[in-house]
Image (spheres, grey):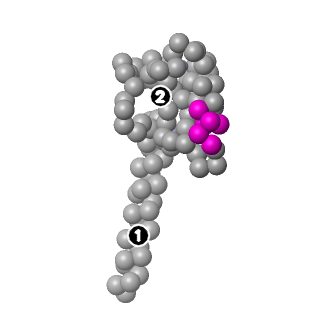
Amino acid sequence: MKPADKTVEEWEEQLESLPCSICNLNIEEEEDKLLLCDRCNRGFHIFCLDPVRDHVPKDDWFWPECVIVKISQQIMSEKSHSQEVLQLQQ
Ligand SMILES: [Zn+2]
Ligand SMILES: [Zn+2]
């Protein structure tokens, strides 16, 4: 996902030089094997992931650590929401 404060050109330039967050390498021939986390915008090679993926998914993809953060944030917001409901009922 493109950050709002970047132009498309800036963003594409950044993607081209984006290193893999696991091996820290940016291999030009492997560019199409770099997965981008839609939450933190970090790059990950599909072959650096554990388990290894054989293709780049077309849908949004999240680095497993970000999935955990995302889920816990959802739980937090649900909790605070149900607390609001409780307060309203009192
Ligand atoms: Zn890598
Ligand atoms: Zn992420």
Q: Secondary structure at mark 1?
A: helix
Q: Is residue 38 left or right of residue 90?
A: right
Q: Is residue 67 left or right of residue 31?
A: left
In the image, residue 9 lies in the stretch drawn in magenta: yes
Q: Nearer the viewer, mark 2 or mark 1?
A: 2
**Residue at position x 56%, y 34% from top?**
42
**Is residue 15 depicted above or below 90 in this figure?**
above
Q: Earlier in the sequence, mark 2 or mark 1?
A: 2
Residue at disc 2, secondary structure: strand
Residue range of the region highlighted in magenta in the rendering: 7-12
The prevailing secondary structure element of the residues shown in magenta is helix
Q: Residues within 10 Å of mark 1 (few under 14, many from 20)?
A: few
Q: Which residue is mark 1?
A: 81
Q: Residue at horizontal 58%, vertical 15%? A: 27
Q: Quadrant of residue 23?
A: top right
Please name the residue that numbered disc 2 is placed on: 35
Whole-percent x, y for residue 21 in the image: 58, 27
Magenta region includes residue 47: no
**How far apart, in angstroms, are the residues tagged by discs 2 and 1?**
34 Å
Q: Amino acid at mark 2?
A: Leu
The amino acid on which the numbered mark 1 sits, given as a three-letter code, is His
